[in-house]
Amino acid sequence: MSSESVARLGALVGDLHRLLRRSAVRRAHRTELPDAQAELMLLVRAHPGVSVKEAAARLRTAPNTVSTLVRDLVDAGLLRRERDPADGRVARLHVTAAARERMADHERHRTALLADALSRLDPAARDAVTAAVPHLERLTALLREPG
């Protein structure tokens, strides 16, 4: 694969992500969260009880950056901080019911938007896109690996 093709793939994936996110937010009549906040919310949903330090390591960012995101999301009622019973200096993070509802609503709108766009592709193109999903999942897993 040429470097130009790789660059096009990266740009396309980013553009698809932004279009789906923004369209779903607009369709849900919600205010868009900044990417960093949305990313943290997804991480906490996937890893309930994650600490700020652990979240920073997983997001590959500084703990003070995550602390700021946490503060803003707690203020917005989307995250909850709980003291670790074994170490009171550590805060464990959890999404709130409001956050779970917001995320489920966003996913419903995103799925509907994507399903509609896929339905407008010809059957061969639709099959090719859906056949690529496991490969894109593997690519995502490779990019998550440290190093």
Image (cartoon, rainbow, N blue to C red):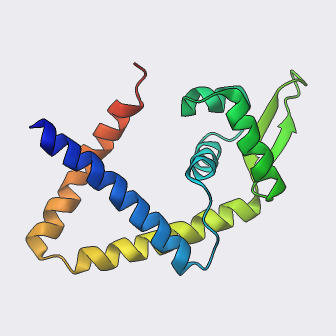
Displayed quadrant of residue 54: top right
Residue at the spot 64% in from the left edge and 27% down from the top edge: 62
Residue 144 left/right relative to 100? left
Displayed quadrant of residue 145: top left
Displayed quadrant of residue 28: bottom right
Q: Is residue 124 above or below residue 54?
A: below
Whole-percent x, y for residue 87 in the image:
87, 21
Q: Is residue 136 above or below residue 2?
A: below
- Is residue 1 visible in the rendered image? The answer is no
Q: Is residue 105 above or below residue 67?
A: below
- Is residue 19 visible in the rendered image? The answer is yes
Q: Is residue 144 above or below residue 71?
A: above
Whole-percent x, y for residue 100 in the image:
67, 61
The single residue placed furthest to the top in the displayed view is: 147
Q: Quadrant of the C terminus?
A: top left
59 or 68: which is nearer to us?
68
Count of numbered labels shown in the rendering? 0
Whole-percent x, y for residue 102 in the image:
65, 67
Residue at the spot 14% in from the left edge and 60% down from the top edge: 128
Whole-percent x, y for residue 57 in the image:
59, 26
Residue at the spot 57% in from the left edge and 47% down from the top edge: 39
Residue 57 left/right relative to 71? left
Residue at the spot 9% in from the left edge and 37% down from the top edge: 2
Q: Quadrant of the N terminus?
A: top left
Residue 13 left/right relative to 44? left
